[in-house]
Amino acid sequence: MILATSIVLIITSLLMILLVLMHKGKGGGLSDMFGGGISSSLGGSSVVERNLDRLTIGVGIIWFGSIVVLGLLLKSNGAG
């Protein structure tokens, strides 16, 4: 169970990094360097941004949950 939770944590961590970098920057940061301007050419960037926000929040919740579960598993494993 600890291994599975650790794998979920690693995958969601990498996804969080990718999703945060994909967000449209306000000052031309890393998101513009990796093609942040592509979403504006799709014609409806507000929908794309909203979906990206929802996906980021969903992955963030899973990421946070896996941290809590892994902490509880490690705490119970060390006490027993």
Image: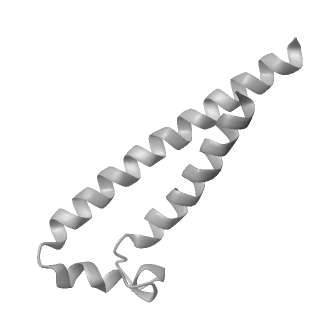
Q: Is residue 21 above or below residue 57?
A: below
**Residue 31 drawn at (x, y percent):** 42, 79
**Residue 18 drawn at (x, y percent):** 50, 66
Quick check: 76 left or right of 41?
right
The mark total stands at 0
**Residue 59 drawn at (x, y percent):** 45, 47
**Which residue is at a point 37% across and 69% down the rendered structure image?**
23
Quick check: 37 left or right of 44?
right
Quick check: 56 left or right of 52?
right
Question: Which residue is outermost to the top?
Answer: 80
Q: Is residue 54 above or below residue 36?
A: above
Q: What is the quadrant of residue 71 in the picture?
A: top right
**Which residue is at a point 73% across and 23% down the rendered structure image?**
73
What colouring method underlies this structural image? one colour
**Which residue is at a point 40% across and 71% down the rendered structure image?**
22
Position of the C terminus by quadrant = top right
**Residue 61 drawn at (x, y percent):** 46, 40
Q: What is the quadrant of residue 24 in the picture?
A: bottom left
Position of the N terminus by quadrant = top right
Q: Is residue 69 above or below residue 59?
A: above
